[in-house]
Amino acid sequence: MKHEPSSDLLQFLRSKNILPNGYFSLEEPDGTYTFYSVSRSGVLYTLDLEPAALSADDVWEKLDRIQKISREVFEQAQESLWDARRLARGLPTNRELKPVAEQFYKDYTQHYAEGRWKTAARYDEETIRHILNIVCSNLQGGGKNQQAAWDRMFRDLVQAKVFRTQRDI
């Protein structure tokens, strides 16, 4: 199903100074907050980056409980949600992975030939992806440079993981 924004919905959000590429929170009746992002085309997304099930009528009824938020606030809420899910599955959280990511990047860029960076291959694929996201979020340059670095490091880690698995068999 294609999610297309209605002009009414966008108008209601504009009345709260929430524009495309913006973020907002909605205070629920129980005192909790739900966070949303608005795409460039005006589609609403949840913290999971799934299309939100909010109609123009929903927004109108809840307009007084909607607050514009910054991208940073949205990303912090998103990180908290993902960390809680990772923790529930017994996986390391973002805070636990930051030093791992820093050490991996240092080893990868300064001591590549020694292969110390390959220790990160012991993690599952989801965790490896998370480590690389942390590393690349700190890299200078545009998105293309970050994506190219991410792809190269991921490819190297997957190859190291395959080699490690074959060696253990």
Image (cartoon, rainbow, N blue to C red):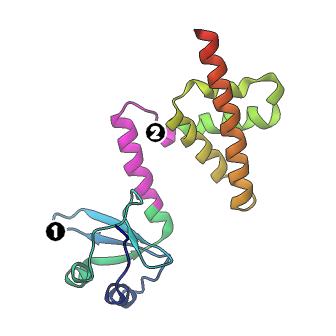
The foreground one among 44 and 4 is 4
Marks 1 and 2: CB-CB under 8 Å? no
Compared with 123, 61 (above or below) is: below
Classify the position of the N terminus by image quarter. Answer: bottom left
Classify the position of the C terminus by image quarter. Answer: top right
Counting residues from the N terminus, which is met first, the one under dot 1 or under dot 2? 1
Residue at the spot x=73%, y=47% of the render? 149
Residue at the spot x=27%, y=73% of the render? 54
Tag 1 secondary structure: loop
Q: Is 77 included in the stretch rendered in magenta?
A: yes
Identify residue type, mark 1: Pro
Give the magenta-colored segment's residue range.
Answer: 75-95
In the orientation shown, which residue stands out farthest toward the left? 29
Residue 15: assigned label:
none
Residue at the spot x=63%, y=53% of the render? 137
Tag 2 secondary structure: loop
Please name the residue that numbered disc 1 is placed on: 29
In the image: residue 77, left or right of residue 116? left
In the orientation shown, which residue stands out farthest toward the top? 169
Compared with 106, 168 (above or below) is: above
In the orientation shown, which residue stands out farthest toward the front? 1
- Which percent across, then down, holds residue 42? 43, 79
Can the viewer see residue 37? Answer: yes
Can the viewer see residue 139? Answer: no
The foreground one among 128 and 159 is 159
Chief secondary structure of the magenta portion: helix
Please name the residue that numbered disc 2 is placed on: 93
